[in-house]
Image (tube, rainbow, N blue to C red):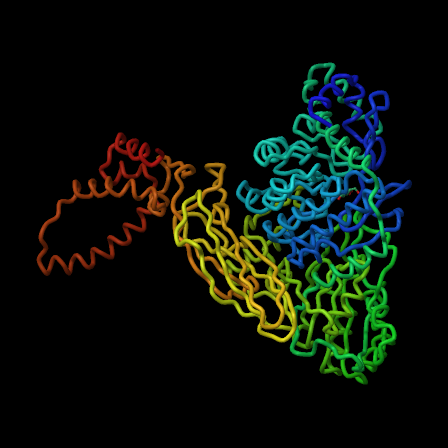
Amino acid sequence: MEKEKIRELVAEMTLEEKAGLCSGSDFWHTKAVERLGIPAIMMSDGPFGLRKQDDKADHLGINDSIKAVCFPAGCATASSFDTDLLEELGETLGEECRAEKVGVLLGPAMNIKRSPLCGRNFEYYSEDPLLSSRLAGAYIRGLQSKGVGASPKHFYANNMEKRRMTSSSELDERTEREIYLASFEQAVREAKPWTIMCSYNRINGTYAAQNEEALTHILRDEWGFDGLVVSDWGASDDRVPDLKAGMDLEMPSSGGINDRKIVAAVQDGTLSEAVLDTACERILDIVFRAAEAQAEGCGNFDREKDHEKAAEMAKECMVLLKNDGMLPLRAGEKVAVIGKYAVKPRCQGGGSSHINSSRVESFLDAVAGMPGIFYKAGFDDASDETNEGLLAAAVKAAEEADKAVIFAGLPDLYESEGYDRDHMKLPPNQELLIREVAKVQPNTAVVLHNGSPVEMPWIREVNAVLESYLAGEAVGRAQKELLYGEANPCGRLAETFPIRLEDTPAYLNFRVEKEKVHYREGVYVGYRYYDSVKRDVLFPFGHGLSYTSFEYTGMEADRTSVTEKETVKVSVSVKNTGDMEGKEVVQIYVAPPESPVGRPAKELKGFAKVSLKPGEEKTVTVELDRRAFAYWDEQLHDWKVYRGEYQILAAASAQDICLSCSVQVQPEASAHTIYTRNTALGDIMADPEAMQKLAPILGRMKQESQPETEQSEAEQSEAGKEAITEKAQQEMMLNMPLRALASFGGVSDEQIEQILGMLNN
Ligand code: BGC
């Protein structure tokens, strides 16, 4: 509906109707205003299947929802590194929503994986904001192309489940911008979601729902968001300040309590009616977008067809972490298939995203009828205790087989929405099973089912590991095709697998202290930390093996020097040098030069997935713009690029750099550092742009203070000693503020002001 018509409609609404429109009528619907022809629309979870509840509503996945298709969870789809796949997932879900008359699907979930312990990591995409934002953007585009609104969530800094409704995420501006906001930014700017869901938590003391800076200044004014902001279910602590901050729609219904508060606030003048009108206009805009799409006709929810799509997707997501040659399996080999998850796979997580799957295809379903398969349960996933009988039977079967494949993973109770993990280990009974089987069977593979990394103290004892993540209802089919080499693994880790929990950057701070969660590791999240401190990891970000091999050649940049307004195109060729068709994920990282601010050793700035037949070669091109080189400057409250030589790396993982080239980035004309009397001389001297301005002045001062004289030999040797002292003096000087030139450098106050004028001009 046109904006003008919406404004007219709002003008006709009573104050009570307007207040009422700003919260749900029940758990899943907005309120209709029949006398004005305003329909209600339905929202449903998301994000990787349709959790539509007819009655018995809840937001924790406890009560039933309609039978639907469970696609791979966010942890899995992210490992595809495939924007086309995410777009197709969005389109498919869009069709399903249309068929079920759902106007907004609550997803994608795209918070950053700050620690492997967050109970909800299985829903989220990555530790890297660029990857997260691009994948989410593709999902949003696909979904909305079907006339169904997306609701990227949870905006923002909601990275642990413990006390998620009250705790305050304490983080600095640079960390917000470079990591936690960045995860949403590109998706919002480019895919234009209809809605965005604000998170439960506080951010630096202010509830996300009341955060005007985030909901209005950043989201709308900077990023151009033009949809509505909806609360996470029950995230409104104080409805009137929420509205003023830009949180338009409260879900679910407040039972009329908050409607009355809004009416009272307008009547007593504490809330401007114009603010309420704006929220109503935004809500009606989305209500009519959804209603108009539905009026065009229903989509088709073909569960069988979508199950096939879920199988295809799962294949693209699984990550072959280790393979010393044991895989692929050969048909006819005698394989001991061990572990409960071969029959009852863990394929999705718990909580609001939980899908009532119409059909789950396990590994044993997929290999039914194949000769040579012997199944043993091995462990009981309802307990951590070893069941000696199950263990002994599994070990015996492994001993008698050609190969053993153990289907292990995290039990449902280990990870879920609503709480976090306490540790990063598999249950002890499964660890023991893996070790005991590996002792008797020299060809042992482990297939994992988990939403977040686990420690693998047994890694050297096994020959292969396939990470399935939570791969959706067709998980078993994908596992069978990948394990038997009917398909080639092509997933890559969207997160680092650390060796031990203690190695993780947030280890000391992943806790709620007096209702605060301190993000003290700052921008050093995931590989940004491990690479910067050169910490060994179990499997790096971006890692994933294939049954074929790839060779990178001919990396080049289309220019060697760029200014802030230019982009640089980086190309690299990749060849399939093996004998099986396969896909490679080319990752482009940028490593900054030394600069006055600490920066991660490198950051992902582009990626592309290419499919190659044996012998085939393709060239991948990634375009890097100013943001690829920038960091967030807290003084300027803006992105800033330092001049210097940036290394551009073409890599197969964060730790497998294949080729590199460099580009000289020129200083910016617009955003420069603001210098004060108290800026350290070292900071000024490290800024080439500032030094260009300052050098002539310093030179003049030096000349004036010590005129040059000829030196005798003795004087020169004395001078040698003095050079050392001079060096020390220089080092000390670097730490002095500019104003110290007045005390120690014979510079007048006026001259200092002059210098500042030049530097800041
Ligand atoms: C979750 C959201 C979900 C909502 C509705 C909340 O508990 O955090 O992700 O969309 O419930 O089920």
At horizontal 60% and vertical 45% (from top left) the residue drawn is 180
The percent coordinates of residue 612 (x first, y second) are: 61, 67
Q: Quadrant of residue 248?
A: top right
Extreme-right residue of the structure:
55
At horizontal 66% and vertical 38% (from top left) the residue drawn is 202
The percent coordinates of residue 715 (x first, y second) are: 12, 57
In the depicted structure, whether residue 396 falls above or below residue 52: below
At horizontal 41% and vertical 50% (from top left) the residue drawn is 595
Q: Is 180 situated left or right of 139 in this image?
A: left
Q: Quadrant of residue 199?
A: top right
The percent coordinates of residue 601 (x first, y second) are: 49, 56
In the depicted structure, whether residue 646 falls above or below residue 26: below
- Residues 327 and 596: in front is 327
Query: Would you say residue 499 is visible in this rendering?
Result: no
Query: Would you say residue 625 is visible in this rendering?
Result: yes
| Count of labels in the image | 0
Image quadrant of ligand 1? top right
Q: Quadrant of residue 433?
A: bottom right
Q: Pick the quarter of the image with the N terminus.
A: top right
In the depicted structure, whether residue 565 falls above or below residue 122: above
Q: Pick the quarter of the image with the C terminus.
A: top left
Q: Is 526 situated left or right of 150 in this image?
A: left
Extreme-top residue of the structure:
268
The percent coordinates of residue 86 (x first, y second) are: 69, 52
